[in-house]
Image: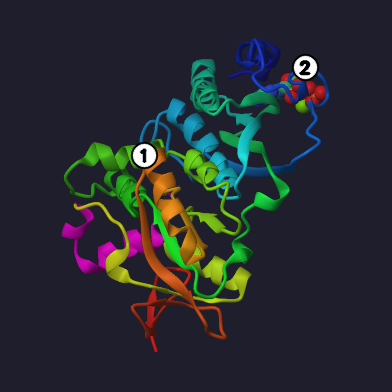
């Protein structure tokens, strides 16, 4: 696509009205302007490069690409306890991409944005050799309800939402011809992940909560919480929620998918035991699964244990025997 069409493109992707009252100026000047006086402002960015993070029309459609790139960003905000409000899109367009492809990326973005009452407030459009999509999100949270991964405390319970490993299985079906039942379920979990915003917001009354979204696999996220909070975690392998089809795979594959395949965009968190009922109720209301998988234990060296103190779960998903 020739970049001379930039103005035409911007006119096509520009919203006809904005949903958020805190927005003062959206697309159309040198910078967007918004104002929020009583809350913290949170921001995150994620970038997708063609043939590295996705293969066009093989791992996902262009519309799904847009949807997914916004979804993973919203997931980061959800994991911080924030409500998503705005997004900016930077796009590098190579000559072999048609305008229709680019527009369908924006179509996917706006579909999910609408669901979360978000506004597209700016971006940048340039030409280049490879298609690149970079989405920046902005959200709001009450200052005392921002959920840091450094807030875990000894005796907390550890919980996760949904089932783990599904998205990794979906990607292996698409790329490596993995044989499994219910293929479309797993493929969907890869292509159109659902960020857990509603659930995270329903936890708003809880005083203290540490939270991460699962983008790099459970093992990596748990180790990050342990390090950031200076605690250790003990999880029970049999309690990790997985799809029943995953249980039919060989052991080493089950371990790979549930601990390290990542990109499920579920949430993992810790909070005091007294809050478990509230967590369960929030999940029920949000229509998702939540499972207690372990607890925070005292230990000096910030580790994640599986089933007993002799099995250490490393960040990469490898279980190391002491
Ligand atoms: P400037 O030269 O001031 O950076 P541009 O010509 O790049 O302005 O963009 C004009 C307007 O269109 C700006 O408001 C910018 O944020 C917006 N814009 C440009 N590209 C995109 C995009 N890919 N997505 C959303 N908004 C965009
Ligand atoms: Mg610009």
Q: Residue at x 55, y 26 (%)?
A: 113
Q: Ligand 1 falls in which quarter?
A: top right
Task: State whether the magenta stretch is mostly helix, strand or loop.
Answer: helix
Q: Name the residue rendered at 63%, 30% in the picture.
A: 91
Q: Where is residue 7 shown, x and y percent of the image?
A: 70, 13
Q: Quadrant of residue 249?
A: bottom left
Residue 284 position (above or below residue 240): above
- Taking the magenta stretch, the answer to whether it contains residue 118 is no
**Residue 247 colored in magenta in the image:** yes
Q: Identify which residue, 36 or 195, lies in the foreground.
A: 36
Q: Which residues are magenta?
A: 245-263
Relative to 96, does residue 240 appear above or below in the rendering? below
The answer to whether residue 188 is visible is yes
Q: What is the secondary structure assignment of the residue under circle 2?
A: loop
Q: Secondary structure at mark 1?
A: loop
Ligand 1: does it lie within 8 Å of the C-beta at label 2?
Answer: yes
Q: Is residue 158 left or right of residue 2?
A: left
Q: Can you name the residue that lies furthest to the right here?
A: 30
Left or right of 88 in this view: 154: left
């Amino acid at each position: 696509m020739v970049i001379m069409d930039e103005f035409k493109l911007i006119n096509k992707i520009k919203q006809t009205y904005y949903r958020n009252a805190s927005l003062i100026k959206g697309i159309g000047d040198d910078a967007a302007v918004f104002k929020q006086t009583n809350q913290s402002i949170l921001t995150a960015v994620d970038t997708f490069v063609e043939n590295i993070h996705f293969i066009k029309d093989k791992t996902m459609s262009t519309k799904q690409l847009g949807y997914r790139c916004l979804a993973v960003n919203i997931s980061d905000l959800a994991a911080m306890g924030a409500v998503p409000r705005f997004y900016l899109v930077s796009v590098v367009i190579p000559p072999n991409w048609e305008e229709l492809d680019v527009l369908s990326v924006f179509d996917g973005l706006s579909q999910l944005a609408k669901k979360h009452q978000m506004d597209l407030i700016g971006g940048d459009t340039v030409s280049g050799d490879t298609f690149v999509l970079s989405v920046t999100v902005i959200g709001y949270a009450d200052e005392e309800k921002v959920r840091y991964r450094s807030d875990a405390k000894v005796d907390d319970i550890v919980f996760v939402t949904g089932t783990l490993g599904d998205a990794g299985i979906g990607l292996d079906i698409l790329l490596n011809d993995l044989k499994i039942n219910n293929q479309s379920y797993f493929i969907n979990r890869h292509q159109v992940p659902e960020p857990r915003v509603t659930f995270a917001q329903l936890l708003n009354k809880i005083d203290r909560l540490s939270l991460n979204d699962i983008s790099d696999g459970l093992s990596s996220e748990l180790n990050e919480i342990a390090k950031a909070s200076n605690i250790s975690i003990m999880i029970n392998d049999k309690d990790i929620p997985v799809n029943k089809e995953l249980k039919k795979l060989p052991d080493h594959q089950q371990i790979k998918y549930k601990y390290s395949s990542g990109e499920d965009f579920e949430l993992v968190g810790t909070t005091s035991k007294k809050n478990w009922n509230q967590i369960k109720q929030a999940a029920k209301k949000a229509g998702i699964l939540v499972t207690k998988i372990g607890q925070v234990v005292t230990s000096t060296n910030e580790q994640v244990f599986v089933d007993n103190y002799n099995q250490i779960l490393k960040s990469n998903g490898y279980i190391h025997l002491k």
